[in-house]
Amino acid sequence: MDVEADFRHDKLRIATGLPLGLPGQWSLVAYRPTQPLHEVAFALCWDQSLIGAAEAQAMKTAVEVRFEAMLDSPSSLSKVPKCVRYKKAELKGRFPLSMNGALPLFEIRDSSMEKLEPAVNLKTHRSWRVTLDFKTTNMAVVTRPQAALAAGAVSSSVTSRSSTDVRLVFPEPNLELWTTKSTLCDASSYFKKFFEAEIVEPTSTPKGKRRKLEGPLLVKAELEPAEADLEDLGFEDADEEIDAIYSEEGQAMADPGDAQYTEITIPATIASYSTYRALLTWLTTSHIDFAPVVVSSKPATASRKDQLKRFRNANPLLPIPVSPKSVYRLASTLNIPLLQSRAIEGYKLELSAEHVA
């Protein structure tokens, strides 16, 4: 990436967006760490980056940053600038561990003030080249941009009646989701047994043909003793406030028309609309975003909901991130072990992020 920058100002702060294809918004920021004009510091900054990483909330990767000065070619026959390597930084580990933050990279000093090699005059020089290489063996990170595109398309489809035959109704927020019997049965042995046992035939109604059921998910799943420690970590579920964000958008239930489908009512005490929407999207795309945890011992704030609203505004097609604990309990109920494991991993990473914060 080639950058034009003027480093002469006392109150320097230049942010350059980085199209990395990773969750959130990434940028390289140049700023003045101290008052003297002969120093400029650089940091890798991110916003809304924690929620959205596939497979794990934080990336286990290495980042190499190269900062070069684009000097004019000494040859009059060539107008191609010469790259002079000035700084290089290598970062290793798992990051980011917060939704928004910055990672200092390095500082450069003006060669007109100190005898440095190669010579770069920060007061007069304007052209720079910055190269960032993200290296990881985690294929979930590599394929995340494509998974996010698929998740956005699927998430939009589950809110409307299309080629679907199951309607999930959430009375309290007055919202609905649509899916197919095959999607539910292929992923969940719980649903497969339920539909196999259900022998009620669809009946005609003025609005179409449907089976209205109160059956699945009304019995709370019992956690296995070895997994019950998720109940004791001191974090609250808050997916109901995410339902409120969807409700504020006016996504009320629509007339399904003259069609045959199975209608299943999901009480708020069993599972939230938000949790189910995230689950349905994951069943098709393997994409799920986890929201920051809420610690019961800390005073409640509006920051979490504000963060989720910001995520929604930045990613209107994706489901709003949900509580990993809520996802775990729903996956346990539906007997989906892979999603249970994903939720546990997300829970641990969120717990680490909370402790770091």
Image (cartoon, rainbow, N blue to C red):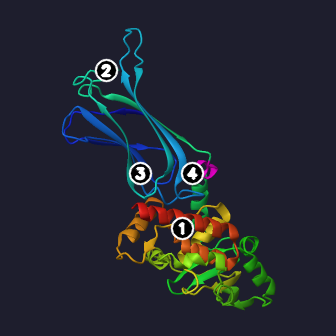
Q: CA–CA distance between discs 1 and 4?
A: 22 Å
Left or right of residue 146, residue 262 in this image: right
Q: What residue type is labelled 1?
A: Tyr
Is 92 in the magenta?
no
Q: Which of marks 4 and 3 is in front?
A: 3
Asked if labels 2 and 1 touch by Cβ distance under 8 angstroms, the answer is no
Which portion, as a residue range, is magenta? 138-145
Q: What residue type is labelled 2?
A: Ala
The residue to which callout 4 is attached is 145
Does the image show residue 223?
yes
Residue 203 in the image, given as x and y percentages of width and height? 74, 91
Q: Which of the marked residues, 1 or 2, is nearer the chain's N terminus? A: 2
Task: Please tell me which residue is depicted at 72% across the width and 90% down the height of the picture.
Answer: 204
Up-down relation of residue 177 to residue 210 (above or below): above
Rendering quarter of residue 54:
bottom right
Q: CA–CA distance between discs 4 and 2?
A: 40 Å
Q: CA–CA distance between discs 4 and 3?
A: 16 Å
Q: What residue type is labelled 4?
A: Pro
Q: How crowded is mark 2: few (under 14 residues within 10 Å), some or many (20 or more)?
A: some
Residue 347: assigned label:
1
Residue 46: assigned label:
3
Q: Which of marks 1 and 3 is in front?
A: 1
Residue 223 in the image, given as x and y percentages of width and height? 64, 81
The residue to which callout 2 is attached is 119
Q: What residue type is labelled 3?
A: Trp
